[in-house]
């Protein structure tokens, strides 16, 4: 296959079609800054062309330059592995999908520390993600692979204020954010109810002399009449029943709304056509609040929520048909649906929010259906079928996952929280991003269910354990990173082999001994997953050291670690495969074995004799031990 891509673009001035070719020889054969990777180039070539064939050559050229960074990252990884004495050389000539998932967090971390602008990091991240995601989707479409999901992600955003990644809101912060959103949503509902009652009493203000009617006590001065016009004629020319008169209608709206129809938190001025439209219908600011609340209350993927259809988005819960509903929407890939449960009672329940959105936007949706029939326009028909249909300044929008739509929605939420004075626990500005809802909900269910994967799967709408495990692989990234960092400490390894590795050699002062036998460098500040629900300033209670970064190992840690390993191996023999594979046990066992494997065999053998008569330590999925202080 020739290492190049081709495409076609239309000149904006001449409107002529221009064909172009772009070489990928630098990716295939390498250059001064990085070495070539023919196999990896072949893997992504088709996807790269598919993404850019309908755009300008300059766009494809810039994207190729951004893709170069991933090649340079792989070079750095090979060089780093080569520098470790006694370790085999690593060569990334190609990456399968599992290898890509494992190495992705390191790529993000590498990119974070590159000396380039935040804006550049955003586009590098976007391009690499888009190319590999498209290559994966094409491989699935051709039945070349059986893997269902690819767990890579976009860390950076296009401006510094909006980027987010591993810094997920805590559950307490999420509750604070939700309470603020709920207050805003209730104000929106009250405003629309008032606007509907006012519009019901109005008449057409666009009659008679416009000047006399508008400014000398005529119909335009009456809020009921202006809202009647918004409701009956509709908010913009594209859908208006009287498109030729739209400019006159718009001019007539240059009167302020009454204070009771203005919500300052949404950054409204209260004057003009859009202000009147927002009093009666849902625009981007109002829908951003509703959408954020649904993602937080259901744990559904944002793209699944955005694809919900008016005709097919819920059914009664068979176990409680009068109190609960099962919500569902199409997943991004394949003919599958994702489900979530919702109460039917409160206005802030996901079911009530979605139903309200559908009801309020009904006049717009009805008009879209009329126009789709008149014009034989399938795009209007598609939009009319979507739940998340809104009004913008110059037309309609929907929440189908597009970076522009979510970016504007996130800006709206940022401004809303800032105006409302909502901050995080450390006093920094509250920032919520739609994809975080799923992580927050899953984290809440996982901890509240005492780390029960099956209940977490049910709450997240996973149909199978297989798909749940793909999702929970994200937690294992922390463990893999810990192992990777330990693997880079050659001096530590040499000390381990000599039995000299103790905290006193690396950090002065007291060291605590956890129930795992590992030394803890800072029990007051454990990693989030090491002590769920931890209060700052208090000692770690759960002591899930395998997810933490504060531990140290010494020879005296070995007996306890070996006792835990024996306990886990015994549990593996007695538990069913399903329970074992969906618990934290496999990860715990792998990490603790990894630590023990770094010690010389003579120390391990001696410690094994001490461990055998010890009482079992691991008897449940979560254990709590008492720390003790030892001076070194």
Image (tube, rainbow, N blue to C red):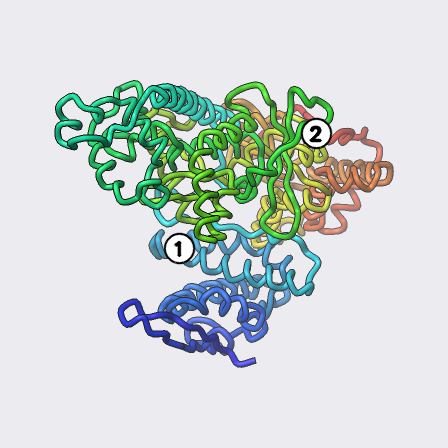
Say if 218 sits above or below 72 in the image.
above
Q: Which residue is mark 2?
A: 622
Residue 315 % position (x, y): 65, 31
Few, some or many residues within 10 Å of mark 1 (<14, 14–19, 20+): many
- Which residue is at a point 57% across and 61% down the rendered structure image? 84
What secondary structure is marked by label 2? loop
Residue 190 % position (x, y): 40, 19
Q: Which residue is mark 1?
A: 121
Residue 393, image quadrant: top left
Q: Nearer the viewer, residue 161 or 137?
A: 137
Residue 324 % position (x, y): 64, 24
- Looking at the rendered image, the quarter that the C terminus falls into is top right
In the displayed orientation, state which residue is furthest to the right. Answer: 574
Residue 26 appears in the picture as rendered = yes
Residue 446 appears in the picture as rendered = no
What secondary structure is marked by label 1? helix
User: Which badge, 2 or 1, is on the more N-terminal residue?
Assistant: 1
Residue 588, image quadrant: top right
Q: CA distance from mark 2 to mark 1?
A: 39 Å
Q: Nearer the viewer, residue 250 or 212?
A: 212
């Amino acid at each position: 296959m020739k290492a190049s891509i081709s495409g076609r673009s239309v000149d904006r001035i001449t409107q002529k079609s221009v064909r172009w070719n772009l070489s990928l020889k630098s990716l295939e054969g390498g250059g001064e800054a990085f070495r070539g990777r023919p196999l990896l180039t072949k893997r992504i070539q088709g996807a790269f062309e598919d993404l850019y064939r309908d755009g300008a050559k300059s766009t494809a050229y810039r994207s190729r330059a951004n893709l170069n960074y991933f090649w340079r990252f792989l070079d750095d990884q090979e060089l780093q592995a080569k520098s470790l004495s006694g370790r085999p050389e690593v060569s990334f000539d190609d990456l399968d999908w599992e290898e890509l998932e494992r190495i992705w967090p390191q790529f993000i971390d590498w990119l974070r520390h590159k000396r380039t602008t935040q804006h550049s990091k955003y586009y590098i991240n976007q391009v690499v993600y888009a190319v590999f995601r498209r290559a994966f989707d094409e491989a699935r479409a051709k039945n070349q692979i059986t893997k269902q999901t690819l767990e890579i992600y976009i860390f950076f955003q296009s401006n510094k204020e909006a980027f987010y990644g591993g810094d997920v809101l805590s559950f307490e912060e999420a509750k604070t954010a939700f309470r603020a959103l709920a207050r805003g949503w209730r104000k929106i509902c009250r405003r629309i109810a008032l606007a509907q009652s006012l519009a019901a009493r109005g008449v057409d203000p666009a009659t008679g002399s416009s000047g006399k009617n508008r400014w000398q006590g005529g119909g335009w001065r009456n809020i009921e009449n202006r809202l009647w016009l918004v409701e009956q004629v509709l908010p913009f020319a594209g859908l208006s029943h009287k498109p030729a008169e739209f400019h006159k209608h718009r001019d007539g709206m240059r009167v302020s709304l009454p204070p009771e129809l203005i919500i300052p938190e949404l950054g409204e001025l209260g004057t003009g056509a859009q202000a009147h439209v927002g009093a009666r219908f849902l625009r981007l600011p109002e829908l951003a609040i509703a959408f954020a609340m649904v993602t937080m209350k259901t744990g559904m993927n944002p793209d699944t929520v955005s694809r919900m259809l008016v005709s097919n988005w819920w059914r009664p819960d068979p176990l409680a048909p009068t109190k609960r509903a099962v919500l569902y929407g199409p997943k991004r890939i394949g003919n599958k649906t994702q489900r979530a449960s919702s109460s039917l009672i409160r206005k802030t329940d996901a079911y009530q929010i979605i139903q309200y959105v559908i009801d309020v936007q009904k006049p717009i949706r009805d008009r879209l259906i009329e126009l789709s029939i008149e014009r034989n326009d399938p795009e209007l028909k598609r939009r009319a079928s979507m739940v998340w249909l809104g009004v913008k300044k110059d037309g309609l929008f929907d929440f189908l996952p597009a970076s522009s739509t979510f970016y504007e929605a996130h800006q709206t939420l940022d401004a809303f929280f800032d105006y409302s004075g909502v901050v995080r626990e450390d006093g920094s500005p509250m920032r919520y991003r739609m994809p975080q809802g799923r992580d927050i909900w899953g984290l809440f269910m996982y901890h509240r269910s005492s780390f029960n994967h099956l209940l977490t799967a049910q709450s997240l709408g996973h149909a199978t354990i297989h798909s749940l495990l793909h999702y929970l692989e994200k937690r294992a990234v922390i463990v893999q990173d810990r192992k990777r960092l330990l693997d880079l400490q050659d001096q530590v390894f040499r000390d381990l082999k000599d039995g000299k590795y103790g905290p006193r050699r690396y950090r002065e002062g007291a060291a605590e001994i956890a129930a795992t036998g590992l030394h803890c460098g800072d029990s007051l500040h454990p990693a989030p997953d090491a002590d769920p629900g931890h209060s700052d300033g208090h000692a770690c209670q759960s002591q899930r050291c395998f997810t933490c970064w504060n531990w140290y190992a010494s020879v005296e840690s070995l007996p306890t670690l070996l006792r835990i390993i024996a306990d886990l191996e015994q549990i593996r023999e007695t538990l069913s495969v399903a329970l074992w594979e969906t618990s934290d046990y496999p990860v715990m066992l792998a990490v603790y074995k990894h630590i023990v494997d770094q010690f010389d065999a003579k120390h391990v053998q001696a410690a094994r004799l001490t461990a055998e008569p010890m009482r079992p330590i691991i008897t449940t999925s979560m254990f709590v031990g008492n720390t003790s202080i030892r001076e070194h």
